[in-house]
Image (cartoon, rainbow, N blue to C red):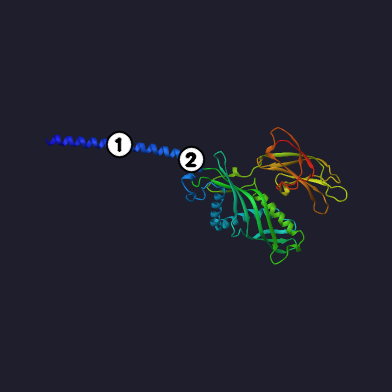
């Protein structure tokens, strides 16, 4: 009797466990199905849908989907990091720019070096940011930046007459776009093996020079020479397509360095209808052409005296490093002899507009400024021919 009682109890308990297990599995299956449906619904949600569920205060400022808030978040954290960035970047910039300053040192100086270089306590402000993915091999970030710096930069210069002068670079105002390239992408932390940085576009660079304890104007031409040297050094050292490479992981990253991709042949044919800059007679025009505005990479035509419709028919060659972003720039000047030449007008052509195997023969309208497109005055035209790269 006890045997049968135990058997019945065992069967009941066993059946109960089986039924409970089945019900539990069915419930879990239903829960998984509902969870999958919920996740799929979240995946289909738009930004506006999410804002109906959660109020704005629950969103972190870097995910709120507004361009202004993303920049606010970025600027807020840059201000916190700036003391460390200042220390590292100051030394990096000093070591990279100083040799270039020496390279473009004006003849009147025998030495041009930094005696002090710190970026200051005021962090730049980012006014725009964009991300460009490079087909899986890298990621490019472009940061538009505005900076009214309180930098402490002193140049130790020595003239050929033996006079040593400490020249302070002050009241720096800068607006431009920096490009950061994270490449190659790797599986190891932090996800990229090297980062390259470059000044993608320089919109404005203002600064003043002051001799510490003196007046720089006492040496004629010194201020203009140093200003030109600083601009050339920036153009040559960090302006795109030049890029500085910072290895994050050990490796050879020479393929990321700036390399020529070809040579551009240009024929400066003629100009017509040039604005006359002379009160007596006509202007004496000549042309300056460049792809990169550096002294040794700039070409100058002959001067045609007393002619507003000059014909040059001169050929020039330029090294091209990045046809997708570079321009050919033409500037027409009036030669004023011993005085400074006066700009008549300028024009430019994007190299990416060149068609393979096809020669272009174009007339370009001259304007006063390539950056400020508000010039409606007619200044004449210049004709150029250029074949594809070789």
Labelled disc at residue 45: 2
Secondary structure found at label 1: helix
> Quick one: quadrant of the N terminus?
top left
Quarter of the figure with residue 82:
bottom right
Between 31 and 325, the one lying in front of the other is: 31
For this orientation, the residue located farthest to the bottom is: 213
The location of residue 114, given as percent across then percent down, is 65, 59
Q: Which residue is pictured at 24% across the width and 37% down the height?
A: 16
Q: Is residue 158 above or below residue 195?
A: below
- Which residue is under mark 1? 23
> Quick one: quadrant of the C terminus?
top right
| Distance from the alpha carbon under mark 1 to that under mark 2 | 33 Å
Between 114 and 361, the one lying in front of the other is: 361
Which of the marked residues, 1 or 2, is nearer the chain's N terminus?
A: 1
Secondary structure found at label 2: loop
Left or right, 239 with reference to 302: left
For this orientation, the residue located farthest to the left is: 1
The location of residue 192, given as percent across then percent down, is 53, 45
Q: Is residue 38 above or below residue 161?
A: above
For this orientation, the residue located farthest to the right is: 280
The location of residue 170, given as percent across then percent down, is 66, 60
Proximity of marks 1 and 2: CB atoms separated by less than 8 Å? no
Left or right, 116 with reference to 271: left
Q: Which residue is pictured at 76% across the width and 58% down the height?
A: 221
Q: Residues within 10 Å of mark 1 (few under 14, many from 20)?
A: few
Labelled disc at residue 11: none
């Amino acid at each position: 009797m006890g045997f049968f009682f135990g058997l019945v109890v065992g069967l009941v308990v066993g059946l109960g466990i089986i039924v409970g297990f089945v019900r539990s599995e069915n419930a879990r299956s239903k829960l998984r199905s509902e969870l999958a449906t919920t996740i799929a619904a979240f995946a289909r949600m738009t930004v506006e849908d999410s804002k109906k569920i959660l109020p704005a205060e629950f969103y972190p400022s870097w995910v709120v989907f507004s361009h202004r808030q993303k920049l606010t978040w970025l600027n807020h954290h840059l201000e916190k990091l700036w003391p460390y960035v200042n220390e590292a970047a100051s030394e990096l910039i000093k070591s990279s720019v100083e040799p270039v300053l020496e390279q473009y040192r004006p003849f009147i100086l025998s030495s041009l070096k930094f005696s002090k270089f710190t970026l200051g306590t005021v962090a730049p402000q980012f006014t725009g940011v964009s991300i460009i993915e490079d087909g899986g091999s890298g990621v490019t970030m472009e940061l538009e930046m505005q900076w009214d710096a309180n930098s402490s930069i002193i140049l130790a210069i020595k003239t050929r007459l033996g006079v040593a002068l400490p020249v302070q670079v002050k009241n720096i105002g800068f607006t431009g776009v920096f490009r950061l390239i994270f490449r190659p992408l790797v599986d190891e932390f932090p996800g990229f093996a090297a980062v390259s940085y470059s000044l993608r576009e320089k919109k404005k660079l203002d600064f003043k020079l002051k001799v510490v304890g003196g007046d720089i104007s006492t040496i004629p031409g010194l201020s203009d020479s140093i200003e030109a040297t600083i601009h050339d050094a920036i153009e040559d050292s960090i302006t795109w397509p030049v890029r500085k490479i910072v290895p994050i992981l050990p490796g050879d990253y020479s393929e990321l360095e700036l390399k020529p991709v070809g040579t551009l042949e240009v024929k400066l044919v003629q100009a017509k209808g040039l604005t006359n800059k002379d009160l007596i007679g006509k202007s004496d025009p000549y042309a300056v052409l460049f792809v990169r505005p550096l002294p040794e990479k700039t070409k100058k035509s002959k001067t045609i005296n007393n002619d507003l419709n000059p014909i040059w028919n001169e050929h020039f060659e330029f090294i091209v490093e990045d046809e997708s972003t570079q321009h050919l720039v033409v500037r027409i000047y009036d030669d004023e002899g011993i005085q400074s030449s006066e700009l008549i007008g300028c024009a430019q052509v994007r190299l990416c507009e060149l068609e393979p195997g096809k020669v272009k023969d174009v007339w370009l309208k001259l304007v006063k400024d390539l950056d400020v497109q508000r010039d409606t005055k007619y200044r004449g035209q210049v004709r150029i021919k250029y074949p594809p790269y070789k």
